[in-house]
């Protein structure tokens, strides 16, 4: 290539960079970001603003540390066409977690980030499914689902619905994360659909959810968005149609019950969901569609799956790993004292504090850098008098907060129990289930679920990590953006039937 061409390319590139800076700073709808009233805005590196911040996503922790060192604890970065304010200053975290939805909105942030990766995401804009989830997860619901989960486990291993032992013989080697992923979906299908759907379609639900999984498409909804615009039906579109159709007969049945004023006999998730959907649609002056109900069901499956299966898989791995030491003995003591199937009560399950401490410890040790995110629906004032401008995404890293803990790299459940309770030293740095306006709606459910599964699996089988997977920590991806860190390859565990 001759010199003229090289010079021309350099000039054109510099022109593009200057145009980009001019547009962002003076012409774009969000140019107010550069007003001194707001936090400093980083568009770096200046010579490659198109790619640099995007690459930072691959190691956000290092990028945030670098930016923090240069620009202070709170700052805004222009990344993938969006202004993202990063808050790391402790005094502002309280504001962040307690800001009302009208100021810092989780729903709108999900809409911006997930976009079309979340099926029927247009519903997120006007409808909030969280009140429905909160309303449904009552103590009565928890009591019933504890019994159901107990039954599902028994079914899965011993009866027609799962045929685990029949399929694998008395011992099987499984990838524990994949096994638990499907197992959690199985128990959630029993909790969050209906008995008929669980009984006849559980495998289909698991497969469809796996195809639809918005977690895989998180912050990468572009491909799906482009396909939708071009009218190309993807595998996910087809799966979504099947997901909707799966629920239609049940929805029609519940609508008829509601019209005829017939109450369900016991806990009925589908009935409650249809009832909520009818009321919600009436409030918005819209007509009920099965798609909205299918969206609500997916909207509970999604958060109920994201971190649960990883937490449960790590709890099982820690239980196996500590089989012969004090941690293992304390866990086993709680497991052994459990009453037989069908007799587990919520009060009893809640009394199992050591298992709860293991859940907290698993979340703590595998939370490398997940971000909590919100959308600034209004200007938000911070402690130093600066503002987060309306329209920005606002994130805060939730890390292991090593400084709070004694010997932070050790797996030590006792740190979460009296008298130590190290987590309480700073409630805004240690938040396994969130805090403020958006604490986890499923906390009680998931603690119950993990306890029941652990107790029952311990009675049904023994587990052993296969030699090739003993060092599984080495293959854990610690640079994940959302959710607990997960291994990048299978972690093999042998499951053997208890005699
Ligand atoms: C070990 C498993 C789980 C962990 C570690 C976890 C963690 C969290 C955290 C940290 C938040 C707050 C996010 C934020 O502030 O940005 C959250 C929110 C939420 N979680 Fe969970 N969660 C788990 C399981 C579940 C389950 C099983 C469900 C449903 C049954 C659920 C439903 C939700 C919902 C609906 C929200 C949003 C609440 C709102 O917007 O007000 N989660 N979760």
Image (tube, grey):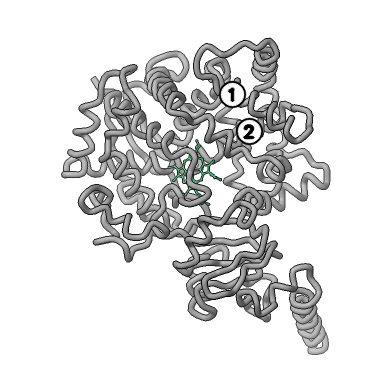
Residue 45 in the image, given as x and y percentages of width and height? 63, 78
Crowding at dot 2, Cα within 10 Å, few <14 / some 14-19 / many 20+, comes out as many
The answer to whether 426 appears left or right of 134 in the picture is: left
Measured along the vertical axis of the image, is residue 38 above or below residue 156? below
Image quarter hosting the N terminus: bottom right
Task: Check residue 296 in the rendering and tell me which mark sits there, or answer none.
Answer: 2
Nearer to me, 14 or 153 = 153
Question: Tag 1's secondary structure?
Answer: helix
Residue 292 visible in the displayed image = yes
x, y (%) of residue 28?
79, 70
Q: Which one is in front, 175 or 409?
A: 409
Label 2 CB sits under 8 Å from any ligand 1 atom: no
Callout 1 crowding tier (Cα within 10 Å): few <14, some 14–19, many ≥20 = some
Quarter of image, res 233: top right
Mark positioned earlier in the residue sequence (1 or 2) = 1
Residue at point 45% right, 20% down?
Answer: 162
The residue shown at (46%, 32%) is 184
Q: Are marks 1 and 2 in contact (CB under 8 Å)?
A: no
The spot of residue 18 in percent (x, y) is 77, 81
- Name the quadrant containing residue 3: bottom right
Residue behind mark 1: 272
- For label 2, the SS is helix
Image x and y of residue 421, in percent? 27, 52
């Amino acid at each position: 290539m001759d010199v003229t061409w090289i010079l021309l390319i350099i000039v054109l590139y510099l022109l593009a960079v200057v145009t980009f800076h001019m547009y962002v700073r003076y012409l774009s709808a969000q140019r107010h970001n550069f007003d001194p009233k707001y936090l400093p805005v980083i568009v770096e590196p200046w010579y490659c603003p198109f790619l640099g911040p995007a690459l930072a996503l691959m190691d956000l922790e290092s990028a945030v540390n670098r930016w923090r060192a240069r620009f202070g604890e709170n700052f805004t970065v222009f990344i993938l066409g969006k202004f993202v304010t990063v808050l790391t200053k402790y005094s502002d975290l309280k504001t962040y977690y307690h800001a009302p939805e009208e100021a810092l909105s989780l729903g709108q942030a999900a809409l911006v980030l997930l976009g079309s990766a979340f099926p029927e995401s247009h519903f997120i804009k006007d409808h909030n499914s969280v009140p429905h989830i909160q309303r449904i997860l009552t103590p009565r619901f928890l009591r019933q689902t504890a019994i159901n989960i107990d039954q599902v486990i028994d079914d899965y291993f011993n009866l027609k619905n799962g045929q685990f032992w029949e399929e694998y013989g008395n011992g099987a080697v499984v990838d524990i994360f994949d096994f638990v992923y499907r197992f959690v979906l199985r128990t959630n299908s029993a909790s969050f659909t209906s008995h008929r759907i669980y009984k006849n379609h559980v495998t289909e639900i698991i497969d469809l959810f796996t195809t639809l999984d918005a977690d895989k498409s998180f912050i990468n909804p572009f491909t799906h968005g482009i396909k939708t615009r071009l009218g190309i039906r993807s595998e996910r579109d087809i799966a979504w149609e099947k997901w909707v159709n799966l629920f239609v007969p049940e929805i029609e049945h519940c609508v008829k019950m509601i019209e005829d004023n017939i109450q369900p006999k016991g806990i009925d998730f589908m009935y409650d969901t249809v009832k909520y959907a009818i009321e919600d649609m009436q409030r918005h002056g819209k007509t009920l569609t099965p798609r909205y109900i299918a969206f609500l069901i997916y909207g509970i499956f999604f958060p109920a799956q994201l971190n649960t299966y990883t937490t449960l898989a790590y709890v099982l791995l820690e239980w196996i790993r500590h089989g012969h030491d004090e941690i293992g003995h304390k866990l086993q003591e709680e497991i052994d004292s459990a009453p037989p199937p069908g007799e587990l009560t919520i009060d009893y399950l809640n009394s199992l504090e050591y298992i709860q401490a293991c859940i907290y410890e698993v979340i703590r040790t595998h939370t490398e850098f997940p971000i909590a995110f919100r959308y600034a629906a209004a200007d938000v004032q911070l402690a130093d008098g600066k503002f987060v401008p309306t329209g920005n995404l606002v994130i805060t890293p939730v890390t292991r907060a090593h400084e709070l803990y004694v010997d932070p790299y050790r797996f030590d459940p006792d740190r979460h129990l009296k008298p130590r309770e190290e987590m309480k030293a700073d409630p805004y740095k240690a938040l396994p289930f969130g805090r403020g306006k958006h604490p986890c709606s499923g906390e009680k459910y998931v603690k119950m679920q993990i306890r029941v599964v652990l107790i029952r699996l311990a009675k049904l089988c023994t587990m052993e990590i296969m030699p090739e997977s003993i060092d599984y920590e080495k293959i854990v991806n610690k640079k994940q953006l959302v959710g607990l860190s997960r291994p990048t390859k299978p972690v093999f565990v042998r499951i053997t039937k208890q005699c």
